[in-house]
Amino acid sequence: MKTLFSLLILLAFACMPLGMKAQEVKSPDGNVVVNFSLDSKGCPTYTLSYKGKTVCKPSKLGLTLAKDKHANAGVHETDLKEGFAVVDTRTSSFDETWTPVWGQYKQVRNHYNEMAVTLHQTSADRTIIIRFRVYDEGMGLRYEFPQQKNLNYFIIKQENTQFALTGDHMAWWLAGDYDTQEHPGQTSRLSEVRSRMDMCLNPAPGRKPDGMCDPVTGNSSTSLVSPTGMQTSLQLKSDDGLYINIHEAACVDYSTMHLDLDDKNMVLESALTPDAVGNMCYMQTPCKSPWRTVMVSDDARTMLSSYLIYNLNEPCKIEDTSWIHPTKYNGVWWEMIVGHGNWHYTNDLPSVRLGETDFSKCKPNGTHRANTKEVMRYIDFAAANNLDQVLVEGWNVGWEDWANMWKFDVFDFVTPYPDFDIKALNDYAHSKGVKLMMHHETSSSAINYERHMEAAYNLMNEYGYDAVKSGYVGDIIPRGEHHYGQFMNNHYLRCITEAAKHKIMVNAHEATRPTGLARTYPNLVGNESARGTEYEAFSGSKPDHTVVLPFTRLQGGPMDYTPGVLETDLSTWSNNPHKVHTTLVGQLAVYMVMWGPLQMAADLPENYEKYSDAFQFIRDMAIDWDDSRYIDAEPGAYITVARKAKGTDNWFVGGKCNEDGHKVTVNFDFLDAGRKYECTIYADAKDAHYATNPKAYVITKKTVKKGDKIKMVEAPGGGFVMSVMAK
Ligand code: NOJ
Ligand code: CA
């Protein structure tokens, strides 16, 4: 009897619906503390603190379900938001060290404490698990849905994960958009987000949009989330000195998350990307959501060195990764971007019908850049300058009517234009130790791409291509889908896994922002998914852009930013009036702060010949690392980093800053004791300035050893780089 009584008490305690018993899990160093509880309505709630300071006040968790004819009648009348009781809580610890195929470090530690809370919703008889993983630099949480009678298929109408902030933090943010991340980055207090957005959405009479500064600017596909919607990763800084970053990890078979701001209460809430009929995600148990992540530190450098997002992804699923390699490339590209040449072959055609249009009968327009002669010139340049590959865009038929038509069968990805000799060019490249890089612009016709993908990858194998840059310009087909919806996220992943079967590395532009999936599929060597260098030829990006992106866009994976434009004044060789918003040396510094195993030298061969001494850095630089040491960092202001080249004793150092300039002392304490290094320093000249004197630079050489210090002065919009070669 007594035992039965105790059991009842125990059961009652375990199934307690109210928030009487908060459950706590701490990071391995004890600084990050997550508390979980149920509120008075049985709604799951958490708090997060760092070194005793609150990061997230009580924040609700839950999901709103669709109640349409596809949902199991009755069962889904109740959302997964309230009426829960805790039935089980399990805690555990995990500590592993893994070796990335490429990245900032030779080895990565994945060390966390975990708490998995099993919740039962009595009214609907359903069970979910909320799993927390707490790291020294933040936490991840996700929803898990075990297979069960009353939760088999379900449709998510909205996810209601909150991040209740403690105040009106500074924010480095991007307008929330279901289709693009190419809007200019914004820096403001959270309380200013609405008015900044409003300025674009309801412009004052006569106000012209500012393509470089306004939060919302034209793009070939755009769908704003809300008047206070922002994208992840969102970088914040509190007045009490905490750097807070909100993002997601392992977004698989789910739609991408944005953040909607309640600017009265400073509460951020997840806003998923809808599909064509307004639903967010279609789920079949057992299944799980991506991780929702909050990184936190009182040192901005931790935001850059952390591998939290990758650690929350699954280990590598590709058994043999020997074919995945760092790739420095140039390309037949910048000429077209600035408007000095074209992707299309002829001006004769009002439209193209794949398989029917005979291009050999069309008159060439004379501005088609992907022609055999021009490509050979780029191959020669790559071979002579330590570049591995040459990207060629506009090699395949279909560019005459590729954009803004919402055309289904726009490209077949296998038929070259008559002036592009695919066999001869690949043979020529290989004979010089260089590969061509494939280009698959899908024009966002995803189904068309999927139909042609196997043939397209086979063609790549046939001619010896092992990397593809793909692209998703324009509105998505199937029509009504968004770039960041579940359908497209599954599409991007399918491209990566199918490419892996063909030993092909993928760099997808305009695809969804990465969430660390490159840990699992390291052939995802890059993405664009933000405003890249191409915008310098359209309207420009502010000098602070590349000292924000490493804090935000790079959290989930590297960016194919395509820097290295040493002729910063485009009007010197084209009709494009724009100037790049960095100094020449600032362009070199971008390679160091925007790390990634795929780096483009974007400028033309003739421009590199003009600045051959500065180009030497691009020839020499490594792009894959055994170690990275952040010397100093502040979002939107400056980043300085020293990186050790993979498999060598050489280091490369770089600093990049915003329009205010920056001074930093490089302390060579990272070098091996007793060894000498030849250090080549590429610095902004004293009078350099990104706007008025960008191409003023000084190159010096010095012998350095451990413990030496060099003071560097970065010009407004400038930076510096150093190659530090072991003697
Ligand atoms: C947009 C991409 O970002 C750019 O790099 C590419 O050249 C064009 N689309 C055409 O595919
Ligand atoms: Ca783009």
Image: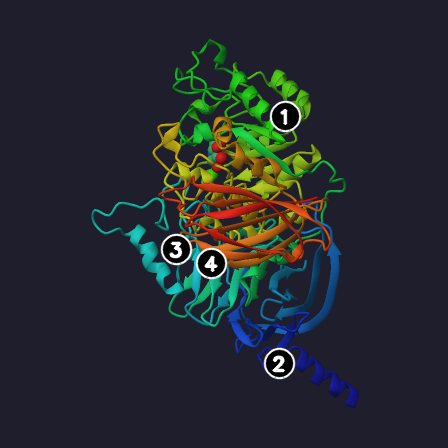
Residue at image mark 2 = 21
Residue at coordinates 63% horizontally, 70% vertically from top-left?
Answer: 120
Please tell me how crowded label 4 is: few (under 14), some (14-19), or many (20+) other residues with Cα within 10 Å: many
Residue at image mark 3 = 226
Q: Quadrant of the N terminus?
A: bottom right
Residues 455 and 577: in front is 577
- Identified by mark 3, the residue type is Ser
Q: Quadrant of the C terminus?
A: top right
Is 517 on the left-hand or right-hand side of 550?
A: right
- Identified by mark 2, the residue type is Lys
Circle 4 sits in a helix, a strand or a loop, which is it?
Answer: strand
Residue 575 visible in the displayed image: yes
Label placed on residue 455:
1
Looking at marks 4 and 2 on the same chain, the residue that comes earlier in the sequence is marked by 2
Looking at marks 1 and 3 on the same chain, the residue that comes earlier in the sequence is marked by 3
- Estimate the x, y position of residue 220 in percent, counting from the top left: 40, 38
Residue 161 visible in the displayed image: no
Label placed on residue 259:
4
Looking at marks 1 and 2 on the same chain, the residue that comes earlier in the sequence is marked by 2
Residue at coordinates 52% horizontally, 35% vertically from top-left?
Answer: 471
Looking at marks 3 and 4 on the same chain, the residue that comes earlier in the sequence is marked by 3
- Estimate the x, y position of residue 80 in percent, counting from the top left: 55, 64
| Cα–Cα gap, marks 1 and 3 | 40 Å
Is 15 on the left-hand or right-hand side of 66?
A: right
- Estimate the x, y position of residue 53 in percent, counting from the top left: 53, 75
Q: Quarter of the image holding residue 186?
A: bottom left
Please tell me how crowded label 3 is: few (under 14), some (14-19), or many (20+) other residues with Cα within 10 Å: some
Residues 416 and 725: in front is 725
**Mark in the foreground, 4 or 2:** 4
Q: Quarter of the image holding residue 87?
A: bottom right
